Image (cartoon, grey):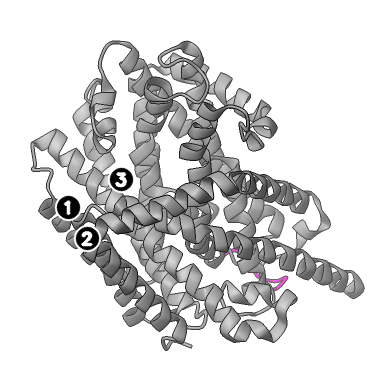
Amino acid sequence: MNKATKVFYIAFALVILTVGFGVIAPEVFEQATGTIRTYINTAFGWYYLMIMALLLIFVIVIIVSPYGKIRLGRDSDRPEFSTFTWLAMLFSAGMGIGLVFYGASEPLSHFAIQPATAEPGTDEAFKEALQRTYYHWGIHVWAMYGMVALSLAFFQFRKGQPALISTTLKPLFGDRMNGPLGTLVDVLAVFATVFGVATSLGFGAAQINGGLAYLFGAPQEYWVQMVIIGVVTLLFIISAWSGLNKGIKYLSNTNMVLAIVLLVLVLILGPTILILNLFTETFGAYVQNLISLSFQSAPLDAENRSWLDGWTIFYWAWWISWAPFVSMFIARVSKGRTIREFLIGVVLAPTIFGSLWFGAFGTTAIDIQKSGVDLTAFPTEQTLFATFSQLPLGIIMSIIAILLVSTFFITSADSATFVLGMQSTKGSLLPSNQIKILWGIAQSLVAAILLSVGGLTAVQNTIIIAALPFSFVMILMVIALFKALNTEHQLMQRKK
């Protein structure tokens, strides 16, 4: 079970070919992938909106249905991790670096640079900026992760199947998933995981470098980012070697504590009353407008449609491309929970915490922008540090933020090596250290090589393209899951 399979070799070869193309002809690579991505956004935007909305509806249906009582494992199984650790682990894997990277910059962009529908710099744009950010990082994302993870966890722990995407489709395709069709599905999952995490590592290195440059005058250059990637690679390899119960568990708890400390400091040192009032109103408006936001495609408004393509459709494709990695990791750490407990935890807890995060950081950044300090003049990776510089204890908060990005960085890479190890060793729940470390080094090299040629945009394009075929796999997974849950429920009823 711990030996590398053909999924490993095929996916590894595809990764090398793609990176090679990006290095040899970076401009051609970026232009070609950009053209395909633009076409997908235009032609399939409605499809992405529909699929994300339907997945949320499916989650609600399962939570309130009798299926919610089914346990992910034997009826006697109980959770392996405490609720706090469990939430910290799925949160760290699911959004990690992105929260810190975009916490201040995305709401600020929606307010000052390019609002969805309002006039830039207005009070209406302020409120809309927060609502749209909650939408992009909120309940739809976690419902999608939750459904894919539920399918994986159910077949792994309830039915004893290998921890592979392909095995979740067996109720529909039977043993054909043991052949080339199953290999194709698993290779697609590995490919999306490698490039999704490599992009995240690139962003993380850039933000750590940006923070060090802003605070201490460190050079913001490629070689500094290589040093950062090298140090972090060493740390997450040590963590990966120590296993799931030590490395990722302790790192995730550290992430959660640092994130809570930073959030509390922003709430106290930022415009506290404004944050609380705006969060109350905008989160309420987000919940109230959830249905209209979910299906808004702006077919007759070219400007708004362009905004949706650049933000909402981009995000939906981006999150779908992350689904194999994040959902497989969430599934792996969720054994023993009931389906109802699992879905409520996966969907609601990160949505509420993430919205509060963006409410606090976004409100603070926009309030500073309105006071006359132009935060939009800074690159995205420095926006957060420029925001902190206008607050008391700004240096301390910036140092905490750099630490948080670093621990998120390590946790994401560590979690990804674990998942990649599972996917390329026939679904082993304890992949060998050699396989994990090989994937870990490969991820870091991909990030380093692509940073050297400025290829992160092309990689984003590539995984968004990969998200389209995986979205069809996701639909099949949901159909197969409902079929299996119905069979399981009938079996349980007969046993009573």
In front: label 1 or label 3? 1
Q: Residues within 10 Å of mark 3 (few under 14, many from 20)?
A: many
Q: Nearer the viewer, residue 296 or 87?
A: 296
Disc nearest the viewer among 1 and 2? 2
Q: Main secondary structure of the magenta part?
A: loop
Residues rendered magenta in the picture: 74-79
Quickly name the residue at label 1.
Answer: 225
Where is residue 112 drawn, in percent x and y?
Answer: 38, 20
> Is the Cβ of the residue at disc 1 closer than 8 Å to that at disc 3?
no
**Which label number is shown at residue 448?**
2
Question: Type of residue at label 2?
Answer: Ala
Decide which of tag 1 and tag 3 comes sooner along the chain: 1
Q: Which amino acid does the dot numbered 1 rest on?
A: Gln
| 227 relative position to 325: left or right | left
In magenta stretch: residue 54: no
* CB contact under 8 Å: marks 1 and 2: yes
The amino acid pointed to by label 3 is Leu
Question: Percent position (x, y) of residue 154?
Answer: 67, 68
- 213 versus 288 height, above or below: below
Q: Position of residue 73 (x, y in %)?
A: 66, 71
